[in-house]
């Protein structure tokens, strides 16, 4: 590779400060160090969490440092590898992952959790294992979002935070398995363990919620009720398998009371895919007190959820999920296979495709509830195919 070992100058959408539009400018991407992989990013979904980190930066528990390159739901091709990398070669198709999987730590070896915390603090604060980022702009360090930063034509990630996928996978589709779709689908299948013939309620019908519906359907749930304050989301939810949809705004009483009536005492499962404590409470209270399970897939770092103990005492279970419970590096290639074998839908999530220059439009579409997923193309169409 002509570029191996060299700094690559390319374009990225840089967030210079919180709550301001991104600027698409030239940055320098340094070569990978030991146990790192440099990726030519081909496609990246725009996720609610990218928006949230930009607009709520500084209000969470984790320090967000700027300037920053966002983006964490991507797919690309390995451009070069650093010393001691044994599992990747230039030309491999890959999906970078914000949740690592080192295979060695007690959590990777345990069958009960997928929460490997290799390089965790560094990745959360925008740097790689050595405490620095590989992206810079005019000599100034630009931080890497969750260690990924896929709104950049090239990025460098640790070899424990990237997975190799089959060479016939379309990168502009399978990028969605890097976050939203895997999260919702796994929330139903892994964390919720939704059972056949059960009743399910899914709160929030964005990509995460639609993927949760897809998981409930795959588990052969009998009834899947979609809940959203935006009724424009209902048609797609039904296409994904919702048997009915309700809009909380159309009722004078709390939505959990409506759902308790609709289900004759509560659903077997509720999946929260919004990220709001009020919705989390409603989700819990809409499950049956006799063994109902509520799974929280929505994200909030700043807020608390108040749970009356009596809501749990009769036998409800309240669970959270991170990356849908999937063991990232190990499981994502299998999800790619499921997509290729038509067991899992991805195309239907993609409502918009835009070039990197239009990234701010993608945020506006998401914020106004007009998109499910926008996929950003990082390479000019003439460069779409890797040259090597
Ligand atoms: N009740 C029901 N639905 C709601 C409510 C509410 N009170 N408030 C918002 N919603 C709906 C929105 O109308 C939207 O359709 O929730 C949906 C959220 O969808 P997106 O914004 O597209 O978000 P998504 O990418 O699916 O992520 C959802 O999961 O990973 C986390 O950070 C992410 O917390 C976010 C959540
Ligand atoms: Zn995400």
Image: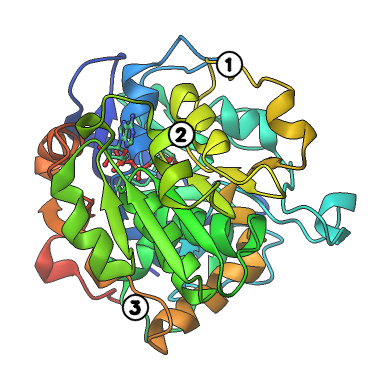
Query: Would you say 319 lies left or right of 62 here?
Result: right
The image's colour scheme reads rainbow
Question: Which residue is denoted by mark 3 in the rendering?
Answer: 388
Residue 170, image x and y in percent?
31, 77
Element carrying mark 3: loop
**What is the distance, in whole Å, between disc 3 and disc 2 at their CAs?**
26 Å
Mark toward the viewer: 3 or 2: 2
Can you tell me which quadrant of the image ligand 1 is in?
top left
Residue 376 visible? The answer is yes
Q: Quadrant of residue 365?
A: top left
Please tell me which of labels 3 and 2 falls first in the chain. 2
Residue 145, image x and y in percent?
45, 34
Element carrying mark 1: loop
Q: Residue at x 22, y 30 (%)?
A: 249
Element carrying mark 2: strand
Question: Which residue is denoted by mark 2 in the rendering?
Answer: 144
Q: Residue at x 23, y 76 (%)?
A: 385
> Looking at this view, is 100 or 42 the one in front?
100
> Looking at this view, is 14 or 266 the one in front?
266
Q: Residue at x 16, y 44 (%)?
A: 231
**What is the distance, in whole Å, between disc 1 and disc 2 at their CAs?**
28 Å
Quadrant housing the N terminus: bottom left
Query: Would you say 194 lies left or right of 208 here?
Result: right
The label on residue 304 is: 1
Q: Quadrant of residue 128?
A: top right
Answer whether labels 1 and 3 touch (C-beta < 8 Å). Answer: no
Mark toward the viewer: 1 or 3: 1
Please tell me which of labels 1 and 2 falls first in the chain. 2
Residue 333, image x and y in percent?
54, 75
Whether label 2 lies within 8 Å of ligand 2 gets the answer: no
> Looking at this view, is 101 or 260 the one in front?
260
Please tell me which of labels 1 and 3 falls first in the chain. 1
């Amino acid at each position: 590779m002509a570029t191996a070992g060299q700094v690559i100058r390319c374009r990225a959408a840089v967030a210079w400060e919180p709550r301001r539009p991104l600027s698409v400018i030239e940055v320098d991407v340094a070569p990978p160090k030991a146990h790192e992989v440099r990726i030519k990013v081909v496609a990246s979904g725009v996720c609610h969490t990218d928006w949230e980190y930009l607009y709520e930066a500084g209000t969470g528990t984790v320090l967000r440092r700027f300037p920053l390159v966002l983006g964490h739901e991507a797919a690309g091709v390995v451009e070069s590898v650093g010393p001691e990398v044994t599992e990747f070669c230039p030309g491999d198709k890959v999906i970078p992952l914000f949740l690592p999987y080192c295979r060695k730590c007690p959590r990777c070896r345990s069958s009960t959790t997928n929460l490997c915390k290799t390089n965790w603090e560094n990745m959360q604060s925008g740097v790689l294992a050595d405490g620095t980022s590989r992206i810079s702009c005019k000599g100034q360090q630009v931080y890497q979002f969750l260690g990924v930063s896929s709104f950049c034509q090239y990025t460098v990630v640790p070899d424990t935070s990237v997975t190799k996928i089959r060479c016939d996978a379309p990168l502009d589709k399978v990028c969605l398995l890097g976050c939203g779709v895997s999260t919702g689908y796994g929330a139903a299948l892994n964390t919720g363990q939704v059972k056949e013939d059960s009743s399910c309620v899914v709160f929030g019908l964005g990509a995460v919620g639609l993927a949760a519906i897809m998981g409930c359907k795959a588990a052969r749930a009998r009834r899947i009720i979609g809940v959203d304050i935006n009724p424009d989301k209902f048609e797609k939810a039904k296409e994904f398998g919702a048997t009915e949809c309700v809009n909380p705004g159309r009722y004078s009483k709390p939505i959990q009371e409506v759902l308790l009536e609709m289900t004759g005492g509560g659903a077997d499962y509720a999946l929260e895919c919004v990220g709001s404590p009020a919705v989390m409470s409603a989700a819990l209270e809409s499950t049956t007190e006799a063994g109902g399970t509520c799974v929280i897939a929505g994200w909030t770092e700043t807020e608390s959820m108040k749970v009356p103990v009596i809501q749990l005492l009769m036998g409800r279970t309240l669970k959270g999920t991170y990356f849908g419970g999937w063991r990232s590096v190990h499981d994502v290639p299998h999800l790619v296979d499921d997509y290729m074998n038509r067991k899992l839908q991805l195309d239907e999530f993609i409502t918009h495709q835009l070039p990197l220059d239009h990234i701010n439009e993608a945020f506006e579409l998401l914020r106004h509830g007009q998109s499910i997923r926008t996929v950003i193309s990082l390479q000019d169409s003439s460069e779409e195919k890797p040259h090597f």
